[in-house]
Amino acid sequence: MSFIKEYKVAIPKFRITDKVLHPRLGRKGQHAICYTDEDIITLAFQAASQLNLATRNSEIDAVLFATTSPVFKNRYHASFVADLLGLNQGILCLDFGTSARAGTDALIMADKLVHSSGFKNVLLIASEVYYPKIGNETRAAFGHAAVAMVVSNEKGIAEITNTKSFSSALAEEFKYKGSSIQYDARFARTEGFKNNLGLALNESDFRAKEVAHVILHSPYAKLAFGQLIKAGFDLEAQLRKDDVEPSIGNTGACHALVLMINAIENGKGNVLIFDYLNGTNVISLSTKEKSTSNIQHSKSTIGHPISEIESYQDYLQLRKQGKFTSKGYTSVEIFSSEMISEREKNSLVHLHGYECAKCGTVYFVKAVRCNSCHHEELNQKQLQKTGVVYSVTSEYYFPNSFAPTNMVIIDLDGGGRMTVQQTDDMFPTEDNTLRIGDKVSLVYRKMMENDNKPNYFWKCVKNERR
Amino acid sequence: MKDSKRNIAIVGLGVTKFGELFHQSYDDLVRDAATQAVNDAGITLDEVQGAWLSTAFPEIGVFKGRSGMDLVEPLNLYGIPVTRVSNFCASGADAIRNAANALAAGECDVAMALGVEKLRDRSPQDSIVKMMVELSHPYFQKGFTAAGTFAVYAKRIMHEYGLTREDIANISVKNHYHGTLNEKAHHRVACSMEQVLGSPMVADPLTVMDSCPTTDGAACVIMVRSEDVDKSKHRPVYVDGIGLSISTGWDLPFFDPKHDFLSFQATKDAAAMAYKQAGITKPIDEIDLVEVHDCFSIVELLTYEDLGLCKQGEAKDMIRGKATQLGGEIPVNVSGGLLSCGHPVGATGVRMVVEIASHLRGTAGDRQVVGAKRGVSHNIGGPGAIASVIVLNNEN
């Protein structure tokens, strides 16, 4: 047996509406989109670093990473994020990414590893930052998010009672050598989607009457309503509407997992998920009241305060983060050293600081002796990610998509001082204007947007007023 | 030893026009300043036995100033020891310190200290800002320009001491007025409070008019031991004290919880050294004029306190009472300061010593501080990390 022990969802703060993207179509959709310095890595880290288990590195024995919008080629995202989380080297790290089904592909794999192969805790991360072509936004579903969950052999929020995958040779829309291919829609959807889903309905092990929520995640879901009824489902009572998509868009490889989490959060009972794209993944979950009441179960970030993008031009800047010319977006040459990042990752990534054994002053940057009392014994100390603004300035001449760059000197709660950039501050409002004494939190972002090398570091955001 | 005078005299002064010297090269500037200083001292280049070259940022120009060689070559000054000195904005002052030490040690009898910087062979956006973006630590301080590293002091001081935005702007108004009296200044235009406050923001709260320009220029002094002064040809000015201190790091202030952003410890430390050598105990009573490193207007205000001209938190009263204006109790930056003269980094410290020396000689023209006997020049470099204080006297 395997269980979903805990999970977190990270959704960017910014939203673009279909009204701004294409005013004349009259659509009412909305999409969560990254700030300039966010990507699949920062979203994945944001979600996973909030998990209790992921930060206790000896207990995670595999990391599975799903995305259709990779930032690396020839480099495993799973391994990269595992390292950011401080997990042990040498554990199983795999990437999944052929299609938007990658999220449930990884979940099936996680279940198999725990269920049949003796793995204890598998960290599953799905992260998606996909943008349709400029001008084509209303034709493609998109939304940015990351989901992180631990699939464990210990009891948790939900039990994974069954997982199965049904392959199909037919794909409705796909790419071949970079070109988009679309077969005849009626042929492909009948012979592909309907046949394959039919197979999954026939051969999966479930009792329709015992299912509380059915999720069918597919661009062609409406074509299959008849099949679901035939399989014994009451659409009105059992089929869950996608009530996430209107607020954040379709989050690709994350989306089936987001829907699953949404179902779990909206009541107990059995959940049955069909995730279709060039084949069907079927996952059954069971949530019982007694199991959900005594586990650490925190809500996802859906519904947190958001910021709406007001113009298409702002959206363009936000999505490609830099100077837009007729040849595309220019990238920034920035000095970024693999050696420095590796050598100093305990401090740069994991925020291990140093505390003077004598006077207790805490330093982020290591020194040979305390600058305050000159004592030479300094002990490692984990710095906190919250603090208070000591001083702040707005830099108008530092190259940045959205000048000014706000530089913030922060006294961290529990000791230590950091000086970092503010982020999520494209639209100056009272909620993101920083003054001395304001409370802030550290978030992990890209240092320079639109760069040509990975360069992630901490920035800060103003704490939301509660 | 460190608390006593070195018994050094400055006998030759040279300073080029400061500004956007598009028609003069690095070498031209070296020749101009050196020739003036040598002529002023009444000597020939052949009599110079050792030299120190101050250039802070060779990589911004055409890679000139990486070694002492770049002083020797334009002057054909071959066959003597020449060293390049680099210590951020205190580089020029440090060239003078090194020359003084060599004279005191007896390595040479006639020494040259020359500072030169050619910043305008690139556009401003292509120079120091670009260096901060592309060359510095990938994460630490990324986002700061030089202005920002001082703006965070301004913000904190305003918060703590009730300093107003107008107090800071008043420094700029004062120094731009002084600059109109200096024919060698980069900018020779007075400005109003409204103009300072209304000019484009650089780093909140500092505007363009709170910031010194990027400038080309060079300055040079010829130095000898006091006992070797020949009063028949020299108009000597004596070095009463030299202090230099690095009191914090490049990154440390931004990561050290004890750094209060209210003063520059480096200035306090350097001043303590120099004052001790000079026997100064009450700076406000014993100093007649000061050149301070007003790279940004806020820095001058902090420096009043750090140099002991007033108590901590009281700098605002000095500027409000016009004590530091020409004709006031203790004129500060009557040259126009960096705000008017501009800041060819390696040259600035030497230019300030030349300025003080000319007042002590009584040859400063329209901006002469009447009866000046003792003056102080001050530089601060890096984000408040390193400071130099030099005390000059017209009597030995």
Image (tube, coloured by chain):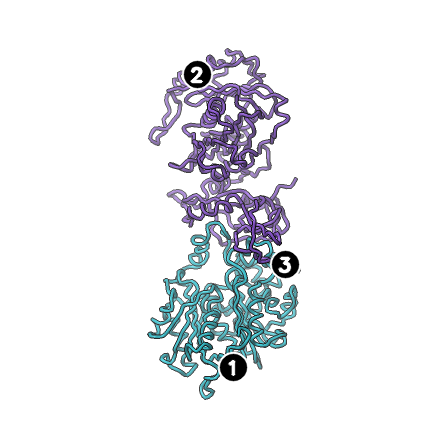
Residue linked to disc 1: B361
Q: In what element is the residue under mark 3? A: helix
Residue at label 2? A194
Quadrant of res B344: bottom left
Residue occupying the far bottom of the picture: B232
| Label 3 chain ID | B
Tag 2 and tag 3 share a subunit: no
Q: Which chain is purple?
A: A
Residue type indicated by callout 1: Arg
Picture quarter with the C terminus of chain A: top right
Chain under label 1?
B
Q: Which chain is cyan?
A: B
The residue tagged 3 is B158
Which of the pair A293/A315 is nearer the observer?
A293
Where residue A344 sits in the image (x, y, percent)? 47, 47
Question: Real-space Cα distance between discs 3 and 1?
Answer: 39 Å
Q: CA distance from mark 1 to mark 2?
A: 99 Å
The secondary element bearing badge 1 is classed as helix
**Marks 2/3: CA distance?**
70 Å
Residue type of the residue flagged with mark 3: Met
- Compared to residue A300, the image places residue B361 above or below, namely below
